[in-house]
């Protein structure tokens, strides 16, 4: 298993396959996608070599991210390529749910067994205002379909936004009462281009934790190898709550993931200063040893923690640029 100087282990890779997104979320891409949709994103062959190298170093979980992964027409092939890589046990994906009702069965058949869907509000008008898309009904239908067809793990992500969705906790709790969903509330993070928005809408995760405890939710012990989410359960609910609080004390001590961008840069931290390109070593199968050596070498530069507390988001211009 890959380990850094702090003794943290890394079984988990977040792999972006595109930075294109078809939503216009107010906290990420309020003006819509401004990049080049024909950019040279990693090919299926490059992804195969990349995942094989990480699997050989002990990684067993790959999360496909974007942008929005479903904008790539070869997504089923990418899923199947990852799922059939020796050593990979879980293939997950984070999506805005745009194409979920139409394609989730196809993705499952290709090898997808875990899913995160972004739902920042259960109120259709508020959802539209936050995402720029009037598609809440389709997204919720897609989540139900994912549950019906037996996707092993279904999680829902909601970014906490002061004065926008911070009064919807009861609605979310009622929604997961009869659904085996892990609902993750994510504290809004500052990025390179959202400072004014961050100052206007940042809400500390402790605000939600206090409300949960008042409602009888109990914090669960952290499992070995678990990520940074604090998890809560309630006897009357099939669903669970996870809280991701990047501004909390010691948040980075539980870091267990690395990131690779859609153009092949290894990012040691979501809010790191830069990335090291791996792409030159993704062109031939014979480069595997050199590729693994570069990954191990770069891990030696991973910092103890991020610098968000200092108002420094590193090189992350917006979350779609490196998979969130």
Image (spheres, grey):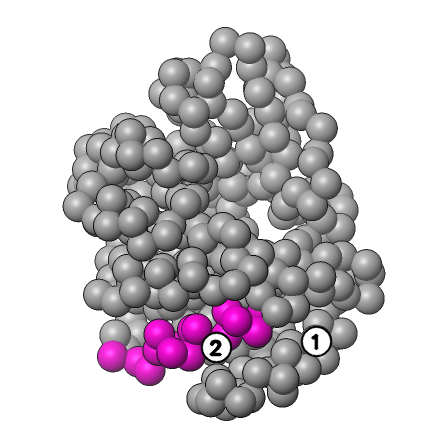
| Residue position marked by numbered label 2 in the rendering | 49
Residues in magenta?
A: 38-54
> Which residue, given by chain and number where applicable, does mark 1 sit on?
296
Tell me if residue 73 comes above or below residue 133 in the rendering: below
**Res 158 visible:** no
Is the N terminus in the top left, top right, bottom left or bottom right quadrant? bottom right
Q: In this rendering, is residue 297 above or below 31?
A: below
The quarter of the displayed image where residue 270 is located: bottom right
SS category of the residue bearing label 2: helix
Among the two numbered marks 1 and 2 on one chain, the one whose residue lies closer to the N terminus: 2
Looking at the picture, does residue 18 appear above or below residue 274?
above
Q: Is residue 189 magenta?
A: no
Instruction: Please state the horizontal and vertical placement of residue 138, each as a whole percent of the image.
Output: 19, 37
Residue 7: x and y, percent?
81, 59
Tag 1: Cα neighbours inside 10 Å, few (<14), some, or many (≥20)?
some
**Of the numbered discs in the image, which one, if any, rests on residue 259?**
none
């Amino acid at each position: 298993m890959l380990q850094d100087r702090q003794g943290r282990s890394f079984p988990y890779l977040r792999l972006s396959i595109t930075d294109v997104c078809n939503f216009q979320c107010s906290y990420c891409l309020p003006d819509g996608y401004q990049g080049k949709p024909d950019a040279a994103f990693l090919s299926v062959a490059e992804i195969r070599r990349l995942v094989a190298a990480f699997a050989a170093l002990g990684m067993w979980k790959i999360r496909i991210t974007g942008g929005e992964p479903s904008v790539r027409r070869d997504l089923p092939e990418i899923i199947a390529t990852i799922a059939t890589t020796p050593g990979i046990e879980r293939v997950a994906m984070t999506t805005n749910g745009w194409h979920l009702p139409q394609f989730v069965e196809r993705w499952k058949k290709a090898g997808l067994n875990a899913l995160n869907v972004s739902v920042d509000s259960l109120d259709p008008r508020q959802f539209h205002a936050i995402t720029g898309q009037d598609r809440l009904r389709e997204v919720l239908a897609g989540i139900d379909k994912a549950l019906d067809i037996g996707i092993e793990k279904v999680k829902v992500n909601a970014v906490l936004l002061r004065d926008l969705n911070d009064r919807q906790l009861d609605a979310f709790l009622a929604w997961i009462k009869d659904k085996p969903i892990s609902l993750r509330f994510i504290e809004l993070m500052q990025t390179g281009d959202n400072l004014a928005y961050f100052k206007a809408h940042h809400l500390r995760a402790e605000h939600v934790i206090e409300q949960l405890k008042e409602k009888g939710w109990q914090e669960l012990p952290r499992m070995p190898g678990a990520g940074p989410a604090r998890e809560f359960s309630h006897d009357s609910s099939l669903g669970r709550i996870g809280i991701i609080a990047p501004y909390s004390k010691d948040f980075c001590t539980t870091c267990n993931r690395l990131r690779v961008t859609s153009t092949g840069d290894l990012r040691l931290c979501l809010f790191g200063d830069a990335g090291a390109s791996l792409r030159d070593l993704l062109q031939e199968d014979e480069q595997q040893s050199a590729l693994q050596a570069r990954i191990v070498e770069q891990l030696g530069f991973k910092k103890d923690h991020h610098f968000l507390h200092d108002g420094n988001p590193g090189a992350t211009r917006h979350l779609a640029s490196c998979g969130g």
